[in-house]
């Protein structure tokens, strides 16, 4: 039965995304390796990437490659329903704010859905420009999720969410993350080809648990538009880079678990996080209790 449901969900996702494409919203295929970085190895890995993806070392993979490096900051708000359906599908619905040198450079609403690729390397990604100039007459914009979605995009978003038997009405903010991102951009003849990204991901609230992961991602536009042979060639280069990293850093482990799920697992059962999230209720309760005791004493 579980296998049938998974197959049904995959078909539903394909059907819904096809409808979205017909309505004009571009669907892209995200293809990336996600590697869990052991504690204390992030700096060494970043130095290795800077050497491996620059100059003569980079030309070993393809003589037409060039690279640049950058550092960015992200704030991500993930949405889910009360049953954590999005997490169960290992999907993602998030509002992302990207900062470069403390300046907001971009905002995106992203929906990521699983594909038939059981390895988790390939996922579907659909992007929307967030709703900013909200009209007073738009009552739906008072909803915590719909306030981020333009009215013209809401039907398309609902079609995508329907693959998980959800609608936008079911969603509310579930998790907020802070990310420090160091990234190598590799281009082929001036066209983006792949990125190697070292992400330090932190829970936004006290006590700020964190993890570090390395993503080797093929450019989604080039990969989506490529034919079978071109995709295979791109995947082969990405595997070469991954394997070089495995040789140099044996502690790296490929883990395709989405960031949203990783952080949920990390904070689950954490007493300090529970305390931080409920501290205002605890303080309020103590104040009420103290006031009640003083009232009874003065009677």
Image (cartoon, grey):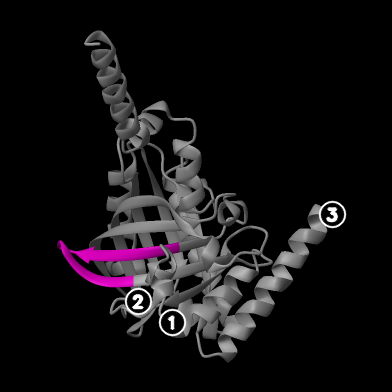
Query: Earlier along the polypeptide chain: callout 2 or callout 3?
Result: 3
Main SS class of the magenta portion in the image: strand
Asked whether residue 194 appears in the rendered view, the answer is: no
Instruction: Identify the element where label 2 is drawn.
Output: loop
Rendered location of residue 161, percent (x, y): 58, 69
Labels 1 and 2 touching (C-beta < 8 A) = yes
Q: Quadrant of the C terminus?
A: top left
Residue 288, picture quadrant: top left
Q: CA distance from mark 2 to mark 3?
A: 40 Å
- Image height of 65 relative to 189, above or below: above
Q: CA distance from mark 1 to mark 3?
A: 37 Å
Rendered location of residue 295, percent (x, y): 25, 16
- Image height of 262 relative to 268, above or below: below
* Residues rendered magenta in the picture: 94-107
**Which of the pair 29/67 is nearer the observer?**
29
- Image height of 22 relative to 200, above or below: below
Instruction: Identify the element where label 1 is drawn.
Output: helix
How many marks on residues? Answer: 3
The residue to which callout 2 is attached is: 131
């Amino acid at each position: 039965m579980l296998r049938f449901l998974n197959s049904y969900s995959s078909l539903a996702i394909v059907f819904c995304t096809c409808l979205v494409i017909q309505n004009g919203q571009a669907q892209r295929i995200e293809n990336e390796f996600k590697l869990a970085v052991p504690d204390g190895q992030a700096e060494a890995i970043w130095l290795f990437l800077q050497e491996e993806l620059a100059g003569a070392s980079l030309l070993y993979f393809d003589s037409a490659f060039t690279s640049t490096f950058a550092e960015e900051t992200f704030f991500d708000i993930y949405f889910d329903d009360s049953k954590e359906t999005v997490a169960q599908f290992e999907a993602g619905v998030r509002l992302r704010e990207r900062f470069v040198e403390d300046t907001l450079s971009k905002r995106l609403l992203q929906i990521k859905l699983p594909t038939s690729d059981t390895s988790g390397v390939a996922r579907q990604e659909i992007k929307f420009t967030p709703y900013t100039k909200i009209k007073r007459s738009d009552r739906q914009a008072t909803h915590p999720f719909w306030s981020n979605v333009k009215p013209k995009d809401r039907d398309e978003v609902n079609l995508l969410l329907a693959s998980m038997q959800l609608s936008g009405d079911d969603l509310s903010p579930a998790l907020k993350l802070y990310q420090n991102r160091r990234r190598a951009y590799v281009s082929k003849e001036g066209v983006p080809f792949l990125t190697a990204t070292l992400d330090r991901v932190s829970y936004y609230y006290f006590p700020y648990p964190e993890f570090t992961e390395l993503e080797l991602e093929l450019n989604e536009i080039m990969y989506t538009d490529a034919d079978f042979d071109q995709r295979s060639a791109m995947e082969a280069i990405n595997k070469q880079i991954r394997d070089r990293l495995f040789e140099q850093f044996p502690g790296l482990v490929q883990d395709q678990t989405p960031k949203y799920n990783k952080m949920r697992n990390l904070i689950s059962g954490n007493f300090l996080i529970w305390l931080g999230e409920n501290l205002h209720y605890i303080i309020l309760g103590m104040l009420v209790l103290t006031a009640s005791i003083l009232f009874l004493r003065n009677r």
